[in-house]
Image: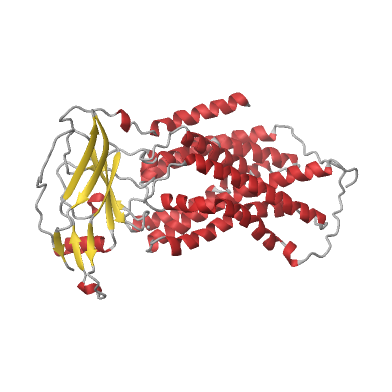
Amino acid sequence: MTKLLLLLGALILSSVGYVRSDASDHRYKEGDIVPLYANKVGPFHNPSETYRYFDLPFCVPEGVKEKKEALGEVLNGDRLVSAPYKLNFREEKDSEVYCKKKLSKEEVRKFRQAVEKDYYFQMYYDDLPIWGFIGKVDKEIKSDPSEYKYFLYKHIEFEILYNNDRVIEISARMDPHSLCFITLLKPFLHYHSQTIFIFMLALVGVFYPYNRGALFTALVVIYALTSGIAGYTSASFYCQLEGKSWVRNLLLTGCLFCGPLLLTFCFLNTVAITYTATAALPFGTIVVIVLIWTLVTSPLLVLGGIAGKNSKAEFQAPCRTTKYPREIPPLPWYRSAVPQMAMAGFLPFSAIYIELYYIFASVWGHRIYTIYSILFIVFIILIIVTAFITVALTYFQLAAEDHQWWWRSFLCGGSTGLFIYAYCLYYYYARSDMSGFMQTSFFFGYMACICYGFFLMLGTVGFRAALFFVRHIYRSIKCE
């Protein structure tokens, strides 16, 4: 088993190691061409609603070349093309005119709409990101929108810092006086192991803050390579309970999370295509993901299921049991499922509440999250608190002579996922400025999938902890 885990770790590191940025290794001589790519534009407050850079009527240079993106970059919505500006290494340039263009009424309308929605652009110079706004709205304390003045930035000043033969920083500033125009069970061991591998890669520095798409690539690769764990644990536990339809159980295991995720993706990708946004995945990328699922995830899931079925493990009850269930006495309302789920979910959620804001600001905003060590500690606290609160509620349930604790422990453990989704509502309306159908659907759609994953993972944590606890206490007694 140890050799298998080491082999799995080596495969994961080799598969995602290439995504680590090597920008720090780029060295240049004076006058060398440094790659500058234009990435995307979009509303600042709707980070999921992004479009190709030249979807706005900028001056299009001759021979625009598209950069071939990695899988993670495509999933992140990156669409890099060669930028029109030439910034050679350590060469000073002053007030160069790139092009002159007379805007048509339709082009003016597009720019006006972009400025009104606080559009920003993103570029990469030697893999270092550059952000800037397209323009600004001058309201001048006027309440009538028809009297607002719209400014389009027509001049960009790049400031590049060097350290000998390397680029270490770049920033872009806009000229504010520019052209003016008026007119957004298997679950536990599978997702838990995936999460642990992600944290391991983060802690060793694989996820360079400006490394485009590294996290998405790692998620896809690790999910595929750890699917065998899901098949093994699911099939072995099912056979311990003397289940006969292990093939159907394996199919359910494979579709339990991926099914809802696929339906959500199909809907949201259709929305992105309608908006012609860069969040819409190209057909080739979809084919790659389907091939990964077909050639890697599914075979490993089946192999793990076969190994689990043949593990010959039997479910050992800690004491003598009876075939006739004992009658459950009437219980007060606060001992029912919903109040206990509320109690079980609140405490673990309160342990991660503060960190959630920074994660949301990074995933659904423009902040850069780098403190993975703190996030790992918070994750461990979440697991421990979930296990302890579920064990406590299971004890009170058994003390009240209610023996139906299996599903209750799973629901209580997973209820934290419901609290996280409730926090999504609060964050959207109170802490963010996201708007529009596309950004709203992306936010609530993908967060529903993430919270569902948390529900499955933490639910299994609660069940496993309760099962361990019940085995321990009943092992000490002589009767059922």
Residue 106 on image: x %, y %: 18, 63
How far across and down, in percent of the image, does residue 396 sit? 77, 55
Q: In the rendered image, which quarter is residue 25 located in?
A: top left
What residue appears at the point 58 percent right and 54 percent down from the top-left corner? 349
Residue occupying image coordinates x 79% and y 41% = 472
Q: Establish if 250 lies above or below 274.
A: above
Quadrant in which the N terminus appears: top right
Relative to residue 20, is residue 401 depicted above or below?
Answer: below
Residue 61 position (above or below residue 176)? above
Q: Position of residue 371 (x, y in %)?
A: 46, 42
> Of all residues shown, which one is farthest toward the right?
478
Please state if 164 lies on the left or on the right of 98 as rendered: right
Looking at the image, which residue sits at the far bottom?
Answer: 144
How does the figure colour the protein chain or chains? secondary structure
| Residue 27 in view (yes/no) | yes
Percent of width and height locating residue 93: 12, 40
Which is nearer the eye, 79 or 346? 346
Residue drawn at 69 percent across, 51 percent down: 390
Q: Residue at x 67, y 35 (%)?
A: 308
**Is residue 110 something that shows in the picture?**
no
Q: Front-most of 55 and 37?
A: 37
Tell whether 218 sits left or right of 142: right
Q: How many marks?
A: 0
